Image (spheres, helix red, strand yellow):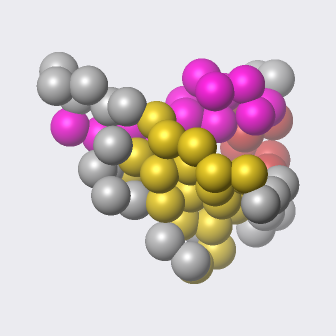
Amino acid sequence: MTKDTFELGTEHEFIALDKLLKLISMVGSGGEAHAVIEDGMVTVNGEVELQKRKKLRTGDVMVFEGTEITIQ
């Protein structure tokens, strides 16, 4: 499994799951992000996440297609 981090920055309290997938180029569009989330292909903190706009905060861990992203 590939492990990486995503820096939220001080101006943001959270990032939506669908936006994270698109921003880090794990999917090509918002529609594709919604599809992979709805299909149960994404986990957050070890649980399948079906909420497209799930708020990810510092310390959360998202996994998709063998890549683990820790929010910092």
Q: Can residue 53 be spotted in the picture?
A: no
Name the residue: 33% across, 43% down: 72
x and y, in percent, of residue 48 in the image: 64, 74
Q: Looking at the image, which is closer to me, 57 or 36?
A: 57
Toward the left, the furthest residue is: 10
Q: Quadrant of residue 33?
A: top right
The vertical placement of 57 against 31, above or below, is below
Toward the bottom, the furthest residue is: 47
Q: Quadrant of residue 65?
A: bottom right
Name the residue: 40% across, 59% down: 60
The vertical placement of 17 against 8, above or below, is below
Residue range of the region highlighted in magenta in the rendering? 13-27
63 sits left or right of 69 in the view? right
15 sits left or right of 36 in the view? left
Name the residue: 32% across, 31% down: 8
x and y, in percent, of residue 28 in the image: 81, 23
x and y, in percent, of residue 49 in the image: 59, 67
Name the residue: 20% across, 37% down: 13
Q: Quadrant of the N terminus?
A: bottom right
Q: Looking at the image, which is closer to me, 51 or 4?
A: 4
Q: Can residue 42 be spotted in the picture?
A: yes
